[in-house]
Image: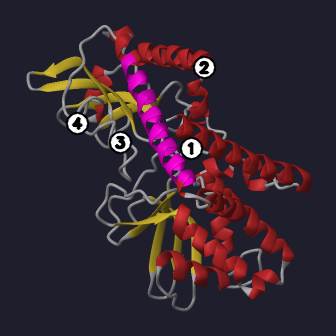
Amino acid sequence: MEQQLLLQHMLLQQTTNLRQKREALKQQTGGHFNIFSILQVHQQKDAIGRFLYDVLNPLGSHGQRDLYATLFAKYVLHTTLDTELRVFRHYLTPDNERIDLVLQTKSQFFPIMIELETPCVLPTKLTCSFYYVTPFGHDAASARSISVSFEKDMTRFVKQALCHYETINVPPIREVLMQFLQMLRKMTNQLGDEQQMELKQTLASSPEMMKSAFAIEKTMQQTKIDLIRRIFADLDAAIPLKRLTNEHDYLAPNKLDGYYQQHASTKPGLTYVFTEIYRDVQLLFRIELDDRLYAGFIATKPLSTEEVKRFLPHIEQPFFDGDFVYWEFLPFDDIEQVPSFKNQSSDDLYFTLFDNVAYRQFIHEAVTTLNRLFLDYL
């Protein structure tokens, strides 16, 4: 046991040394200077949409005609383009549904929807399939969506664009695409190629190192699950109601154990009865964890907007999103102040939750939001 702990310590020390070496190199060479990261573009789907619009547009400022649209079609859409390509941003369908990006040729129509941290409004009346782009290729709640990921599909497209001789011969385009690729890697938690290779070599250097890495991985997984369990227990303790322990509860089978094992979230949470609307209809209050923590109201049967406003008069602008008639992020309804529990970057607020003072502040602020949404109106 002591030998295993010593090996784990050695592995962690070598990993730290690798990270410090890479960090020093970036500081010396300006590796942190990335205009996409400085402007927080990875959190702004409109900014990514503008960039892709210009890159894919044959009339874009890059001056390479349809080169990048052709590569995009091959490596992201998995097709080839016909002639007379046109690219649109914020395209309006005949039913006035807005599409983030559209590629259109004489006989082809490729609608593209982009979703980052906050849910996007999906087209419901569009008769053709659409491409649903998310950081890790999550599925949309639509049978007509085709899943696309920034992690694999978009990264592959940018790599192919960087390898093309037309890009290599134009330094400004090459630099912009390289910075966009670095932003994609940061957004999707991908290590740099050289750092990843060095880390792989360290892990593969001996059976003991691999065993140590395996033990560390299992311990980290359980530590992350314990944090979720602690958060739900502390929030539940602050609510003076008995929660509904149904299949959606955080302690239901496989809710927590499966949270990190499955590609899609198991959505563990807490559920309470807010009010009885009709004899057979209840308005529930739900705290739920997808990638981020949020809380809102769910009706056990469909309600109209007028009914929602009547039974939730303190909610200024109710909206419908899946089962929810209204929800907000916790601890604040501000995406930049909400920890990511599944898809973190190295500077995510998630890691502050392992500091006890910051954790207690997180719970206090979350309960303050719950009071405003729910407890003050019981």
- Residue 10 belongs to magenta span: no
Tell me the residue at 53%/40% (across/down). 4
Residue under label 1, please give it.
344
- Relative height, residue 88 to residue 168 (above, below): above
Residue under label 4, please give it.
253
SS at mark 3 in the image:
loop
- Kindly identify the amino acid type of the residue bearing the numbered disc 3: Asp
- Kindly identify the amino acid type of the residue bearing the numbered disc 4: Pro
Residue under label 2, please give it.
358
Give the CA separation, mark 4 to mark 1: 25 Å
- Badge nearest the viewer, 3 or 4: 4
Q: Residue 38's mark?
A: none
Judged left or right of residue 97, residue 53 is right
| Numbered range of the magenta stretch | 208-233
Tell me the residue at 56%/43% (across/down). 344
SS at mark 4 in the image:
loop
| Whole-percent x, y for residue 290 in the image | 40, 40
- Relative height, residue 329 to residue 123 (above, below): above
SS at mark 2 in the image:
helix
Give the CA separation, mark 3 to mark 4: 26 Å
Give the CA separation, mark 2 to mark 4: 30 Å
Label 2 crowd bin: few (<14), some (14–19), many (20+), radius 10 Å: some
